[in-house]
Image: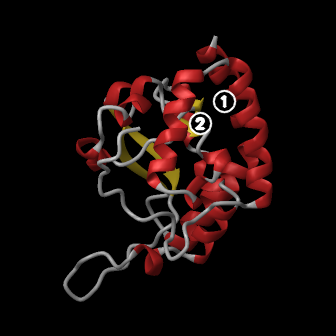
Amino acid sequence: MKRIMDLMISLILLILFFPIIILVAIAVRLKMGSPILFAQQRPGLHGKPFYLYKFRTMSNLYDEQGNPLSDEKRLSGLGKFLRKYSLDEFPQLINIVKGEMSLVGPRPFLMEYLSLYTKDQMIRHNVKPGITGWAQVNGRNNITWEEKFKLDIWYVENYNHLLDLKILFLTFFKVIKREGISQQGHVTMEKFKGSNEVM
C-alpha cells in the first residue's frame, strides 16, 4: 500500500510541477553549468547503496592545490534559494518512481556514516529512506544527531499510513515557513562523528 501511494503521488507531483522542474533545471544550467543534477551514493533499505538525485546547488570552486573549497564558499546564490524552498529535492521523485526511496522515511545520510552507527541506529535502515520524515518535521537540521536518530527509530517502530499523511501535511508548512534548513554555523549540519549513546 505504501509503495502504491508513493508511486501515485510521485507521478502526480512530477506532472503537476513539471514546468517548475524545467525552469529550475534551466536556471541551474545557466548559473552553474553542467551537470544539472547532483548524484551521490547513499545507503537505502538495509543499507544497500543507491544514487540519490538533487538539483545541484554548489559551484565547482577549488583552491590553488586543487581541493574543493568549503561548502559555505561553494554554495551559490541560486543554490541557497533552491534549498530555502526545498526545490533542489524534486529529482528525488525519480528515486521514488525507481523504488529506491519513499515519500516518507528517514533521510538518507552519507555512506561513510554507516560504519559509525550503533546497532540501534542501524534500525533506521529497516525501511526505505524518504524525501521527508519524522525528524524533518521535528527540527530538521536544527536538532542534534542523537535526536535525529531517536526520531527516525521512533518512526520505524511506529509507522502507519496516517502517520505518513501527518508528516506530509506538516512538511508542507515546514517548507512554507522555511524552518530548520541549516544548523547554526553550517550550510546544513555538522558531520556525524559517531555516538556511544545507546538509543
Quadrant in which the C terminus is drawn:
top left
Dot 2 alpha-carbon crowd within 10 angstroms: few under 14, some 14 to 19, many 20 or more:
many
Q: Do the residues labelled 1 and 2 touch (CB within 8 Å)?
A: yes
Dot placed on the residue nearer the N-terminal end, 1 or 2:
1
Which residue in the protein does label 2 denote?
93
Which residue in the protein does label 1 denote?
10
Relative image position of residue 44 (x, y in whole percent): 39, 32
Toward the top, the furthest residue is 1
Q: In this view, does 38 lie to the left or right of 138?
A: left
Could you say which is closer to the camera, residue 188 or residue 62?
188
| Residue at the image point whose x is 76% and y is 31% from the top | 166
The amino acid type of the residue labelled 1 equals Ser
* SS category of the residue bearing label 1: helix
- Vertical placement of 151 versus 57: above or below? above
Dot 1 alpha-carbon crowd within 10 angstroms: few under 14, some 14 to 19, many 20 or more:
many
- Residue 176, quarter of the rendered image: bottom right
Relative image position of residue 160 (x, y in whole percent): 65, 18
Colour mode of the rendering? secondary structure
| Residue at the image point whose x is 52% and y is 65% from the top | 57
